[in-house]
Amino acid sequence: MVTLYLTLSLNYNKYLTYSNFNTLEIQETKGCLDKIPRNSEIIAGTFFTPYLSDRKIVYMYPSRHVTKYVVLDLRYALEVDFLSLTNNNYKKLENCGYASIYIKNEDN
């Protein structure tokens, strides 16, 4: 019982410390993600899926599905991920906070 309490308590404290030191980036990321319309289908990186769960459909990145928006986490995405999106007819819409948002180019 004590071990479980300490584990939960220490992890929660680590989360609070992280969020306190990164408040500006977190708020900037949330503001950016809020610009994506609620009725959109999205592919998103792991940490963004809970925040975006009120959208029409959210697929986990990477996905074989084609959606209008793709959201990558700038902290963990690789250059290969960005190149793959541009090669699949997505263009960068915005980088803000920890998020990089891509939109499907409808011109082609």
Image (cartoon, rainbow, N blue to C red):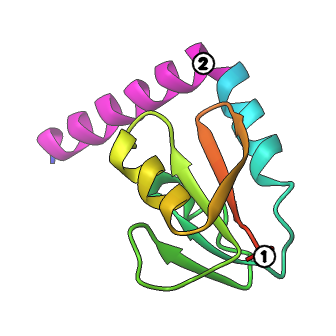
Q: What stretch is highlighted in magenta?
A: 2-23
Residue 64 shown left or right of residue 50 in the figure: left
Which residue is tagged 1?
Answer: 106
Disc 2: CA contacts within 10 A as few (<14), some (14-19) or many (>=20): few
Q: Helix, strand or loop at disc 2?
A: helix
Total number of numbered discs in the rendering? 2
Residue 56 shown left or right of residue 85 in the figure: right
Q: Does 28 appear above or below 50?
A: above
Q: Say which quadrant the C terminus sits in.
A: bottom right
Q: Does 75 appear above or below 106?
A: above
Q: Considering depth in this image, is 21 or 74 the residue closer to the camera?
A: 74
Kindly identify the amino acid type of the residue bearing the numbered disc 1: Glu
Q: Nearer the viewer, mark 1 or mark 2?
A: 1
Q: Considering depth in this image, is 82 or 99 the residue closer to the camera?
A: 82
Which corner quadrant of the image does residue 75 belong to?
top left
Q: Helix, strand or loop at disc 1?
A: loop
What is the distance, in whole Å, between disc 1 and disc 2 at their CAs?
Answer: 40 Å
Label disc, if present, on residue 75 of the rendered structure: none
Label disc, if present, on residue 20 of the rendered structure: 2
Q: Residue at x 19, y 46 (%)?
A: 4
Q: Residue at x 66, y 30 (%)?
A: 97
Please provide percent x and percent y for residue 77: 40, 43
Please provide percent x and percent y for residue 71: 59, 56
Please provide percent x and percent y for residue 19: 57, 26
Tell me which numbered mark, 1 or 2, is placed earlier along the sequence.
2
Kindly identify the amino acid type of the residue bearing the numbered disc 2: Asn
Q: Residue lying farthest front?
A: 108
Verify whether residue 36 appears in magenta. Answer: no
Q: Does 26 appear above or below 103?
A: above
Q: Does 36 appear above or below 67?
A: above
